[in-house]
Image: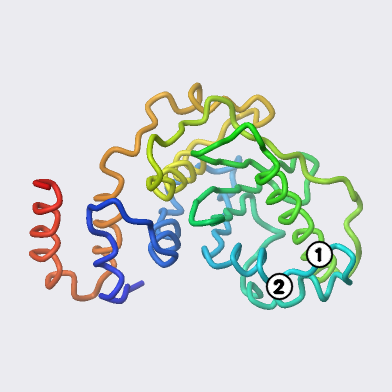
């Protein structure tokens, strides 16, 4: 996969919001062979584009509207993505310029769980709960449309917020946090999601150097990367000095 050279300047080592393109490209570049297997089979992961949540939250209609009207256009948008025969579905969420993350684990199974990550948690968890409800409703619609019969269970998927989740100390690092949350989780999923304590599972968690890591990843995908290396080195040096 090659990346347009226009994406690269957004990766400067400055305190800017990660763009939708950068979040998606970096997340999708996570090497499949790094993700642990379930027994003898490879782990299957669907990483949704960052614009998915934007479309879902903006375009869906109210609960009183027929399901096709609520979710039909969104399902058409992600027609090439597998939601059923996968182990994890990664959903980057952007609300009011703040990034959070939902990872749906083992969808449509008895052990299905929805894990919500937010590096700027508040005492009011209604926002993450509303996000989980909307994702759950969409998944039930996906099953009905693709399997042609209703899901056996109408119970909402259990929503989990990890304990001791690292919190950002500023207003601009949320994108870095969700990228690293996703990477850590997918490479070493907790054995028991119902007792998920983040600091116990990932005691060495850090976002130090994450901007440069994102920059290098995207630069490695550019077909004309040699043109950008000296420019980015100069920009990075200037950023570090200031």
Q: Position of residue 24 (x, y in %)?
A: 45, 62
> Which residue does the image show at 80% across and 41% down from the upper left?
110
**Picture layout, residue 85 above or below residue 39:** below
In the rendered view of the protein, which quadrant contains the N terminus?
bottom left
**Picture layout, residue 35 above or below residue 219:** above
Q: Quadrant of residue 8?
A: bottom left
Depth check, front residue: 202 or 101? 101
> Which residue does the image show at 58% across and 26% down from the upper left?
163
Q: Quadrant of residue 94?
A: bottom right
Q: How many other residues sit within 10 Å of disc 1, few (<14), some (14-19) or many (≥20)?
A: many
**Picture layout, residue 197 above or below residue 142:** above
At numbered mark 1, what does the secondary structure look like: helix, strand or loop? helix
Q: Quadrant of residue 135?
A: bottom right
> Which residue does the image show at 57% across and 53% down from the upper left?
90
At numbered mark 2, what does the secondary structure look like: helix, strand or loop? helix
Q: How many other residues sit within 10 Å of disc 2, few (<14), some (14-19) or many (≥20)?
A: some
**Picture layout, residue 179 above or below residue 73:** above
Name the mark on residue 225.
none
Q: Does the residue at mark 1 contact the one at mark 2 (Cβ under 8 Å)? A: yes
Q: Is residue 53 left or right of residue 236?
A: right
Q: CA distance from mark 1 to mark 2?
A: 9 Å
Q: Position of residue 21 (x, y in %)?
A: 41, 67
> Which residue does the image show at 27% across and 60% down from the upper left?
11
Depth check, front residue: 181 or 80? 181
Q: Position of residue 235 (x, y in %)?
A: 13, 59
Q: Position of residue 63 (x, y in %)?
A: 85, 62
Q: Is residue 42 left or right of residue 34?
A: right
Q: Which residue is mark 1?
A: 141
Q: Which residue is mark 2?
A: 75
The earlier-in-sequence mark between 1 and 2 is: 2
Q: How many marks?
A: 2
Residue extending farthest to the top is 200
């Amino acid at each position: 996969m090659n990346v347009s050279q226009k994406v690269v300047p957004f990766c400067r080592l400055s305190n800017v919001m990660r763009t939708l393109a950068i979040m998606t490209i970096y997340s999708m570049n996570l090497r499949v062979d790094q993700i642990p297997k379930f027994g003898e089979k490879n782990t299957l992961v669907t990483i949704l584009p960052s614009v998915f949540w934007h479309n879902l939250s903006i375009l869906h209609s109210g609960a009183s509207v027929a399901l096709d009207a609520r979710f039909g256009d969104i399902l058409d948008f992600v027609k090439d993505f597998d939601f059923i025969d996968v182990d994890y579905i990664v959903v980057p969420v952007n609300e009011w310029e703040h990034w959070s993350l939902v990872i749906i684990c083992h969808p449509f199974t008895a052990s299905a769980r929805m894990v919500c990550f937010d590096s700027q948690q508040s005492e009011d968890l209604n926002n993450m709960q509303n996000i989980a409800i909307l994702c759950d409703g969409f998944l039930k619609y996906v099953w009905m449309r693709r399997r042609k019969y209703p899901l056996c269970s109408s119970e909402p998927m259990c929503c989990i917020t990890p304990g001791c989740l690292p919190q950002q100390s500023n207003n601009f690092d949320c994108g870095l946090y969700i990228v690293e949350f996703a990477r850590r989780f997918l490479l070493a999923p907790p054995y028991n999601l119902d007792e998920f304590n983040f600091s116990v599972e990932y005691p060495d968690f850090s976002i130090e150097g994450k901007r440069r890591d994102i920059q290098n990843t995207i630069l490695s995908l550019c077909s004309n990367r040699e043109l950008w290396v000296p420019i980015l080195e100069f920009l990075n040096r200037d950023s570090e000095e200031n």
